[in-house]
Image: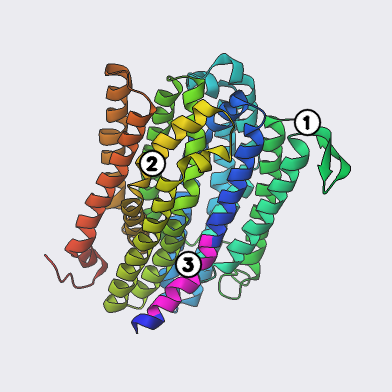
Amino acid sequence: MNRAMLKTILLLAWPAMVEQALQTVVQYADSAMVGHIGVQATAAVGLTSTVTWLTNSPIWAMGTGVLAVIARSVGAKDERKTRSAAQMGIWIALIMGAIMLLITECIAPFLPKWLGADPAIHRNGSLYYAIICAPMIFRALSMVMGSALRASGNTRTPMRVNLGMNAINVVLNFFLIFPSRRSSLFGVSLWIPGAGWGVIGAAIATAVSVTFSGSMMLCKVLRSPVLSPRGLKTRWDAPVLRECVRIGLPVALQNIGVFTGHVVFSAQVTSLGTTALATHSIALTAEQAFYIPGYGMQAAASTLCGIALGERNEDKLDRTSRMSLLLSMGMMVLTGGFLFAFPALMMSIFTKDPLVIAGGAVVLRIVACSEPLYAAMIIFEGIFHGVGQTRYPFVVSLITMWGVRILGTIICVRAFHLGLPAVWLCMVGDNVSRAALLGVRYFSGRWKRTLGLTAVND
């Protein structure tokens, strides 16, 4: 049974891992291409990254609610509820995408100044953010419909769609960021056309690729034999909608609280100067590749735990969650070890600036030591989200983000005038403390009582 469970987890997890890897490769390509323009270009792009996470987070949270409802109804073999939840997911994506589009375009002109950035990067920072947020409705469709597909056990389709999106992004980056130039390939001189739009070109490439992803995810859901709402009346299913919102709302509040904290955190880093901001942004990008296994396993854990709950199978729920936890931590022991051994190599992919490389190597070694516990945190959140237990992670994340990361960073930067390594230690402290608090909740077993299951450990 354990061997069959392992096979099921890996079959669901590997497409999600590939999807995460593809997104990371594109992020690497974006950062490397923009990094060759200069430190100011890197800072302009990195400046708004945390705000982008913040504006995406309510949509992603509603996708979590849709995922939990669909996974549970699939486990219970309730076909009508599954299709109705997918239909509600479409409406949620359209409405929330329109709301976030309005908000982001209104704040874009003022954002760099609010974040305390160097005036030299204000214009590019504002334009970059405004352009990448322009297709917000398509971004919402991509996130929510992707969650719906994964909840039904289909992780390969989101992987394929993201493969296409990432290919479009990289190709457009190549032609839009750099000007026309001559290049040599195997001794043959080639003329390569280019727009030479720099940061703006990178933003346009992202916007076009996101539009493609959202369109394709919607088409795949409408064609899915499990999810397609065709044949249902176009109406609000109030009970299903309430269930999606009930599960998703704490995640939305959690994300808003956490990513608002990220914005404050980023503002503290910005106060350290343009070089520190560029180092911070590039190091965050470099680290992304090393938690791919965790987020891939999280997708599998959320789906399978939700399905097990729908089946009312507590033994399957326990075995799925614990095996996902062990696999994820084991994988991230390996990735963390590699990151600790070769941090300068990772930084050199994105920049040739020796100060940025040296500073990034220090902070990457710091975060590498915490990767296994970060994996545990990711899986615990995935388990709780998959079964609809979203309130406790919300409370924990607010406590650790604001009580450990933000307060610690303000003290380090403002009171003791410490640099970027101290800031990253505060970030690691946030992740470790969150993993510990979620782990206490999980291993107590009490969370299963509210699901109508027997909690065996008090």
Magenta range: 5-17
Neighbor class of circle 1 (other Cα within 10 Å; few <14, some 14-19, many 20+) is: some
Residue lying furthest top = 119
The quadrant of the rendering that contains the N terminus is bottom left
On the rendered structure, is 277 left or right of 404? right
Q: Position of residue 160 (x, y in %)?
A: 64, 63
Q: Counting residues from the N terminus, which is met first, the one under dot 3 or under dot 2?
A: 3
On the rendered structure, is 235 left or right of 172? left
Q: Which mark is residue 365?
A: 2
What's under tag 2, amino acid-wise?
Arg
Q: Residue at x 46, y 67 (%)?
A: 70
Colour convention of the picture = rainbow
Q: Main secondary structure of the magenta part?
A: helix
Q: Counting residues from the N terminus, which is met first, the one under dot 1 or under dot 2?
A: 1
Residue under circle 1?
Answer: 196
Give the alpha-carbon distance from disc 3 to disc 2, as whole Å.
27 Å
- Tell us which disc is closer to us: 3 or 2: 2
The quadrant of the rendering that contains the C terminus is bottom left
Neighbor class of circle 3 (other Cα within 10 Å; few <14, some 14-19, many 20+) is: many
Residue under circle 3?
Answer: 13
